[in-house]
Image (cartoon, helix red, strand yellow):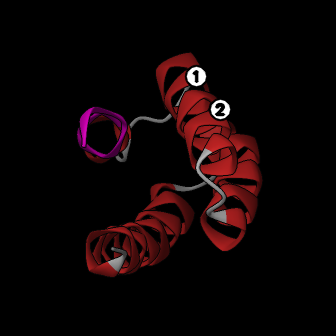
Amino acid sequence: RGYLDTLAAEMATGGPTWRRAAHGFKGSAANLGAAALAAELAAAEALDMAAAEARAQALHRIAHMFEHSCAVFRSRP
């Protein structure tokens, strides 16, 4: 959740903090096998200097995929 919170806090301004959070979150997602989430985060890394609306849309997708991934992991025995 820390990475997600950082992305939310940096959504309006972007910049290096957004890029670092997306990159770190991508690595964590990949290590856990959440490939779709990692791919979305890889695309989000490049949005550090994009319009805030692009980051907002990406954050919406990332948050949705994150919640879905959490539900999948919680359902595993």
Rendering coords of residue 62 (x, y %): 47, 67
Q: Is residue 3 magenta?
A: yes
Give the left or right position of residue 39, taking residue 69 as reference: right
Helix, strand or loop at disc 2?
helix
The residue under the point 37% across, 47% down is 11
Could you tell me which residue is drawn at 23 percent across and 40 percent down? 5
* Secondary structure type for disc 1: helix
Query: Which amino acid type is marked by label 1?
Result: Arg
Q: Nearer the viewer, residue 16 or 68?
A: 68
Write down the quadrant of residue 48 in the picture: top right
Q: CA distance from mark 1 to mark 2?
A: 5 Å
Q: Quadrant of the N terminus?
A: top left
Q: Residue at x 26, y 33 (%)?
A: 2
Neighbours of disc 1 within 10 Å: few (<14), some (14-19), many (20+): some
Which x, y percent locates residue 4? 32, 46
Asked whether disc 1 touches disc 2, contact meaning CB atoms under 8 Å apart, the reply is: yes
Identify which residue is drawn at 58% across, 18% down: 16
- Image quarter where the C terminus lies is bottom left
| Identity, as a three-letter code, of the amino acid under mark 2 | His
The magenta segment: 1-6
Return the residue at label 1: 20
Q: Quadrant of residue 28?
A: top right
Crowd class of label 2 (few under 14; some 14 to 19; many from 20; radius 10 Å)? many
By secondary structure, the bulk of the magenta-drawn segment is best described as: helix
Residue picked out by circle 2: 23
Query: Which dot marks residue 71?
Result: none
Question: Does 2 lie within the magenta span?
Answer: yes
Residue 63: percent from left, percent from top: 35, 68
